[in-house]
Image (tube, grey):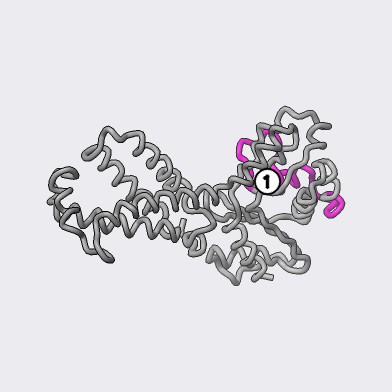
C-alpha cells in the first residue's frame, strides 16, 4: 500500500500542468446552478482510499521524516496528492473526500457527486467534504486538486481543447529545440572539427565582436564552448532553466555590445528563453526524469 502512494507521488510529479479551480468563478452561482456544475480533477491530482489501516498517515510521516513509531489511529483513511508550484503536496482525506473525487472523475454533476460522497460517509458534513475534496465557493485559496470543467460555452470548450493540445510540454520542447538550433549553428561557425576555435573567429572578436574587458582569444573560446554546451543541455532538457538563463545572458551581451540594431531578433530569442527560465523544460526532459525543478 505504501508503494502505491509512492507511485501516485511520481505520477503527480510528472503530470501535465493545468490551471487550478478559481473559487471566485463559483461564488456567484445559485445553489441549483452550483449543483449542476461539472468539475473534474486536476491532471496532477492523485488519490487513494485504504480501508483497514492508516496507510496515508504512515506514508506521510515517513515522507516528512517524522517519528515512524508514533501512535496511529488504526482506521481507514485516504490521501490526496497534487502538485503545487512544481512541488508535490498531499493531505489526508476522509472516505467522503475520496468518494467525491471519484464521482467528479466520473464527470458527475457536483450535486450528485456530493450525494455519493455522503452515502459513503453519512456522518460527514457537506462543508467538510467540499473543503477537503473540492474547492468551496468563496474560499480565497484555490485547491490544486481540482479544476473547472469548461463546458459552459463552445468557445470555452474550444479554448480548453487548445490548452490540452498545445500544452506546456509541447511549447517547452519547441522552445528548447529552436534556441538550441540557433545557438549551436552560431557555435559551429566558430570552430573546426569538434571544438577547435578558428583564427577567423578570434579575429571577429578582435574587430566586429569586440567586447569590453575581455581579450579576443577568451571571448572566442568562451562563446564557442557556450554555444555548444548550453544548446546540448537544452536538447536533453537537463538544467533547462540554467541553460536558458545563460543563453539569455549571451543574448543581452550581443544586443548591448555587438548588434544593437538587431533588437527584433534578440527580442524573439529572449521571449523563448524567458519562457524556459520561468516554466522549465516540461515532462519531455531529463529535468523531469531526475526531478530537477
Which residue is found at the position 75% from the left and 33% from the top? Answer: 152
Q: Is residue 263 left or right of residue 23?
A: left
Circle 1 crowding by C-alpha within 10 Å: few under 14, some 14–19, many from 20: many
**Secondary-structure class at tag 1:** strand
Residue in the image at 27% along x and 32% along y = 261
Give the residue pinned by disc 1: 146
Whether 15 is drawn above or below 4: the answer is above
Q: Quadrant of residue 72?
A: bottom right
Q: Read off the magenta span.
A: 118-144
Verify whether residue 123 appears in magenta: yes
49 and 69: which one is in front? 49
Residue pictured at 67% horizontal, 63% vertical: 56
Q: Is 147 drawn above or below residue 229 in the view shown?
A: above
**Dividing the image into 4 quarters, which one contains the N terminus?**
bottom right
Please tell me which residue lies in front, 71 or 172: 172
| Depth check, front residue: 31 or 291 | 291
Q: Picture coordinates of residue 59 (x, y %)?
A: 62, 66
Is residue 141 shown in magenta?
A: yes
Horizontal side, residue 75 vs residue 207: left or right = right
Closer to the camera in the image, 272 or 203: 203
Tell me residue 204's x, y (percent). 17, 48
Q: Quadrant of residue 237?
A: bottom left
Please give the name of the residue rendered at 42% of the width and 54% of the height, measured from the top-left corner: 240
Residue 27 spot, x, y in % from top left: 70, 30
Amino acid at each position: 500500500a505504501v508503494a502505491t502512494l509512492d507511485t501516485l507521488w511520481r505520477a503527480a510529479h510528472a503530470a501535465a500542468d493545468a490551471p487550478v479551480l478559481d473559487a471566485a468563478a463559483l461564488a456567484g452561482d445559485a445553489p441549483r446552478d452550483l449543483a449542476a456544475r461539472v468539475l473534474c480533477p486536476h491532471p496532477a491530482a492523485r488519490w487513494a482510499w485504504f480501508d483497514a489501516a492508516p496507510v496515508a498517515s504512515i506514508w506521510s510521516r515517513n515522507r516528512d521524516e517524522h517519528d515512524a513509531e508514533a501512535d496511529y489511529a488504526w482506521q481507514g483513511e485516504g490521501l490526496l496528492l497534487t502538485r503545487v508550484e512544481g512541488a508535490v503536496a498531499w493531505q489526508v482525506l476522509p472516505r467522503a473526500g475520496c468518494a467525491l473525487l471519484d464521482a467528479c472523475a466520473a464527470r458527475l454533476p457536483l450535486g450528485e457527486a456530493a450525494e455519493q460522497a455522503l452515502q459513503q460517509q453519512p456522518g460527514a458534513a457537506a462543508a467538510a467534504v467540499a473543503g477537503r475534496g473540492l474547492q468551496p465557493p468563496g474560499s480565497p485559496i484555490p485547491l490544486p486538486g481540482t479544476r473547472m470543467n469548461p463546458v459552459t460555452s463552445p468557445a470555452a470548450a474550444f479554448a480548453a481543447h487548445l490548452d490540452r493540445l498545445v500544452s506546456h510540454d509541447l511549447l517547452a520542447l519547441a522552445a528548447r529545440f529552436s534556441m538550441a538550433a540557433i545557438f549551436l549553428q552560431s557555435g559551429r561557425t566558430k570552430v573546426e572539427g569538434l571544438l577547435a576555435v578558428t583564427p577567423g573567429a578570434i579575429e571577429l572578436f578582435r574587430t566586429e565582436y569586440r567586447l569590453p574587458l575581455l581579450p579576443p582569444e577568451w571571448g572566442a573560446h568562451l562563446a564557442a564552448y557556450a554555444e555548444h554546451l548550453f544548446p546540448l543541455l537544452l536538447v536533453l532538457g537537463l538544467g533547462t532553466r540554467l541553460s536558458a538563463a545563460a543563453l539569455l545572458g549571451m543574448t543581452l551581451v550581443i544586443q548591448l555590445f555587438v548588434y544593437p540594431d538587431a533588437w527584433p531578433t534578440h527580442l524573439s530569442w529572449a521571449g523563448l528563453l524567458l519562457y524556459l527560465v520561468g516554466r522549465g523544460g516540461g515532462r519531455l526532459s531529463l529535468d523531469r526524469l531526475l526531478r530537477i525543478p
